[in-house]
Amino acid sequence: MSAAPSPSAAAAHAEVHQRPVLEINQLEKCFGDTQVLTSIDLRVKPGELVFVIGPSGSGKSTMLRCCNRLEEPTSGSILLDGEHVTECHGRALDKMRLKIGMVFQGFHLYPHKTVLANVMLAQVKALKRSKPEAEARAKEMLEHVGLAHKASATPGELSGGQQQRVAIARALALDPKVMLFDEPTSALDPELVGSVLKVMKRLRDEGMTMVVVSHEMEFAREAADRVVFMDGGVVVESGTPDEIFGNPKSERLRAFLSRLSPGAA
Ligand SMILES: Nc1ncnc2c1ncn2[C@@H]1O[C@H](COP(=O)(O)OP(=O)(O)O)[C@@H](O)[C@H]1O
Ligand SMILES: [Mg+2]
């Protein structure tokens, strides 16, 4: 970098603010000889909620998992807040991973620990917060997802929807830059889905940057800034919810949508 001040410092500043929180460039992923992601490009701006749809096996989970290197990308780059996730190793990678909150279909809570302990654990182990600090933050986040009153319960005493909200609180307690959701409501009984979506909607309204893989199309219409349609490991189409649901351009997207709600398309 040159030491000379830039003549357009204001413009540069504005650009920094528009810098994507998460940036995926030309991501490719192969499992052996099988290529499951091809030339994926995705930029998620601060506060944006990007919704990812597509048939089973289209590579949605693999894409999310590459973002925090649960899967190793075959090629391409991923940047979080301008830093290369794909070039991190060891401790630096551990640190980077903490900035990416992940919520899966299964909740992965420790069954023998209380809800409060579940939300505290990674804060103490990974972020090295003191116990009182972690406890205060855990209580705050449980309050946020409407479960302060369940702090001393064990996960088995909660409904699936409540367990998923604990998992969200646990991720939030680590102060992530972005939250990635992989079918967060798919394992839930229909009557419990709403409580989880409500928490996600609230996060969005508070300005959290989010990538959500889900089949909850009504939620997408309501809450997504942008919808990305994947099929066969490529991004086929992306646009606003109105564009994607109201005016799908590709035959593949039209077919996918009509399979979801036969008769409606
Ligand atoms: N660990 C793995 N080894 C081999 N193939 C995998 C692995 N994980 C996923 N795949 C394959 O990659 C493709 C995309 O899977 P996935 O990302 O789970 O799709 P989606 O989440 O859209 O259903 C599928 O064909 C799947 O079988
Ligand atoms: Mg999946």
Image (cartoon, rainbow, N blue to C red):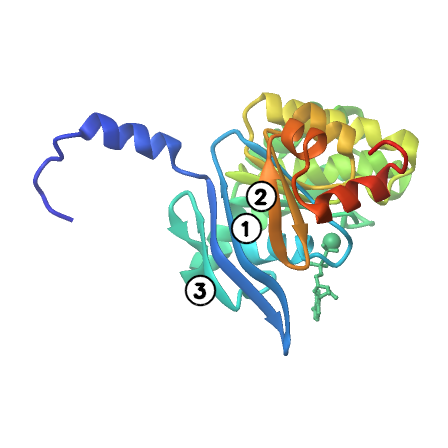
Quarter holding the C terminus is top right
- Do the residues bearing badges 2 and 1 touch, measured as CB atoms within 8 Å? yes
Picture mark count = 3
Dot 3 surroundings within 10 Å: few (below 14), some, or many (20 or more)?
A: few
Q: Is residue 131 visible?
A: no
Rendered location of residue 209, percent (x, y): 54, 34
Q: What residue type is disc 2 on? A: Gln
Q: CA distance from mark 1 to mark 3?
A: 16 Å
| Residue at disc 1, secondary structure | loop
- Pick whichever of labels 3 and 2 is earlier in the sequence: 3
Q: Which mark is residue 126?
A: 1
Q: From the viewer's perspective, is 41 left or right of 65?
A: left
Dot 1 surroundings within 10 Å: few (below 14), some, or many (20 or more)?
A: few
Rendered location of residue 87, percent (x, y): 41, 62
Q: From the viewer's perspective, is 103 left or right of 69?
A: right
Displayed quadrant of residue 172:
top right
Pick the residue in front: 226 or 116. 226
- Pick whichever of labels 1 and 3 is earlier in the sequence: 3
- Check the image and name the residue furthest to the left: 4
Q: CA distance from mark 3 to mark 2?
A: 21 Å
